[in-house]
Amino acid sequence: MKVFIFWASWLHFPAAVWLLSDIIRKTGLRRWTACAMLCALSTLAYARFVEPRILVTHREDIQLTGASEQSATIRIALFGDPHIGIFRNAMSLSRIVERINAEHVDAVFLAGDLTYYPTSGQIDRELAVLAELDAPLFVVLGNHDVGRPGPDLSSPVMAALDRVRAITPHNRALEVTIGGQDLVVAGASDLWQRRQDFTFRADLPEDTPIILLTHNPDTALNVPHDFAYDLMLAGHTHGGQIRLPWLYRKAIPTDWPFDKELHVFPTPAGDRLVYVTSGTGMVGLPMRFLMPPRIDILTVHLPE
């Protein structure tokens, strides 16, 4: 059905010509009906052919707990859900890489769902462009990468990421230097895979900011209360993907009301910051509407 909708959408163009002919040649109710139908079809055509090709850059400052505007900062790029696969109109990784390199960031974070029913050889071919990033790349897998739903592509995706020297911190923590600042980058495997393990938190250094990268922001519901991460980065929601007023929230697959951008998530041990990127690809329908593909450029102010 997904593939049928993808290809059937090309029928918009002959249908638009036929409706335009009615608008020009007919009168009365027939003309107004054709106008209404053409407007509806044009909206769908915009969502199918235009908006998925618009790449937006969103910039935001985030102050971690204990930080101020004068604190040391790192500048990172976050994107997610490229969904390379059956939808050929998805935003290309080459454009994403080019845009990120133009931002001269200190690090890049990719929040999972790299694939969506890719063809044979497509994983290696598409992910190879990630090697052209000018900054270190941290990646976790998402539910579509691990077979929930679809085929389990963990092995070929991880092999392709290894070839481009991506860092994959699944269920572990790494002490790193980003932009001259010491940090811990931790990662959580996909929530729906039910293999998340946070035992690494027992060995974390004190007084070092912790960035937790995961796919599903509902991971915040699963993190032990004594794991005091400073900022979680996630994707998964697509910001609703087709963002019709009041209806898009029903399409967001989360239990907590995560949507996009920065959320303050309450826990018994204190509030946690969760930032959700709205993604660059598509699932279900080969469309985006009022939610174009987006890269988030985050200036993160570190605790003093």
Image: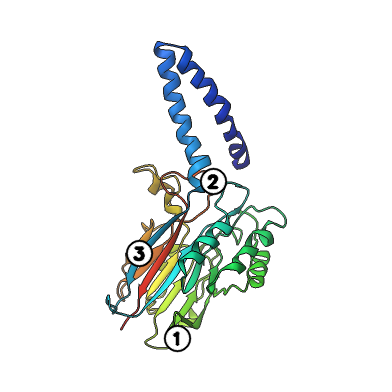
- Residue at 48% from the left image edge and 53% from the top image edge: 55
Q: Which mark is residue 60?
A: 3
The amino acid on which the numbered mark 3 sits, given as a three-letter code, is: Glu
Q: Is residue 274 visible?
A: yes
Sequence-wise first label, 3 or 1: 3
Mark 3 and mark 1 in contact? Answer it, CB < 8 Å: no
Type of colouring: rainbow
Q: Would you say 69 lies left or right of 237 here? A: left
Mark 1 and mark 2 in contact? Answer it, CB < 8 Å: no
CA distance for labels 3 and 1: 28 Å
CA distance for labels 1 and 2: 39 Å
Residue occupied by mark 2: 284
Q: Quadrant of the N terminus?
A: top right
Depth check: give the residue in front, 172 or 276: 276
The amino acid on which the numbered mark 1 sits, given as a three-letter code, is: Leu
Q: Which mark is residue 204?
A: 1
Q: Would you say 208 lies left or right of 71 here? A: right
- Residue at 45% from the left image edge and 48% from the top image edge: 241
Depth check: give the residue in front, 66 or 135: 135
Task: Pinpoint residue 141: horizontal percent, then vertical percent.
Answer: 56, 65
The residue most toward the front is 102
Sequence-wise first label, 1 or 2: 1
Q: Is residue 215 visible?
A: no
Task: Pinpoint residue 226: horizontal percent, then vertical percent.
Answer: 38, 80
CA distance for labels 3 and 2: 29 Å
